[in-house]
Each structure stands twice: as C-alpha cells, then as structure tokens.
Image: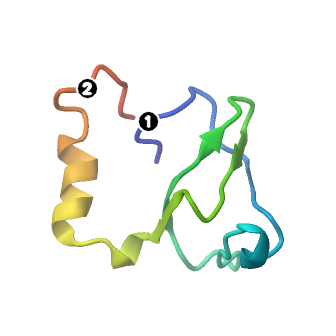
Amino acid sequence: QMFKGPDKDIEFIYTAPSTAVCGRLLDTGGKKEYLIAGKSEGNGKMHITLCDLVSTWDSLSPTQKKSLNQRYQMGCECKVS
C-alpha cells in the first residue's frame, strides 16, 4: 500500500550491502511487511539507507497503523491510495 509517493508501484528497493556503509537489512523471504520511507526515483526504484524510516509493520502500535490507514490524509493535499 502506498501512503504517499509516485503513481507507479515501487518494484525495486536498493540499499548498500551492509550496515557498515549505511545499508539496511531486510527480510527478503516474503514473510515480513515493512513501513518504508526512502528516496523514490519515480521509475519504480527506491533507495534506502540507515537514515530512512524502515520498521516492520508488526512493530507499529495500533494507533500508528490507524493513523496511517485512516488519518494520514487529514490536513494533507497528497493522495492516499
């Protein structure tokens, strides 16, 4: 689900190969969902570093999830889809 970003889906997420060079470690086995804020190139590619927000969806509180799913668009001219 895209909360704010390009009209096109993100197909690839790039990061450095290790945390020593600001890379992020993600579970790529398909069993975890993440909330990710990074730098989109607008062409289906996104880059993330240690400075970007990356949290597992399960680690968010119920209030955070509700705010993202229901309240995010309030006071914002962005499109939430």
Residue at screen point 70% across, 49% down: 47
Residue at screen point 19% across, 56% down: 66
| Amino acid on which disc 1 is placed | Lys
Give me the disc on residue 4.
Answer: 1
Residue at screen point 29% across, 19% down: 77
Place residue 6 in its image quadrant.
Answer: top right
- Residue 21 lies, in percent from the top left, at 78, 69
Give me the disc on residue 76.
Answer: 2
| Amino acid on which disc 2 is placed | Cys
Q: Nearer the viewer, residue 64 or 17?
A: 17
- Residue 73 lies, in percent from the top left, at 24, 33
Q: Which of 67 and 8 is in front in this view?
A: 67
Total marks placed: 2
Say which element carries label 2: loop
Say which element carries label 1: loop
Q: Residues within 10 Å of mark 1 (few under 14, many from 20)?
A: few
- Left or right of residue 45: residue 9: left
Discs 2, 1 touching: Cβ within 8 Å: yes
- Residue 59 lies, in percent from the top left, at 36, 78
Residue at screen point 68% across, 29% down: 42
Counting residues from the N terminus, which is met first, the one under dot 2 or under dot 1?
A: 1
Q: Is residue 63 above or below residue 3?
A: below
Structure colour scheme: rainbow
The residue furthest top is 77
- Residue 10 lies, in percent from the top left, at 66, 43
Rounded to the nearest angstrom, the CA distance separating label 2 from label 1 is: 10 Å
Q: Is residue 65 above or below residue 56?
A: above
Q: How crowded is mark 2: few (under 14 residues within 10 Å), some or many (20 or more)?
A: few
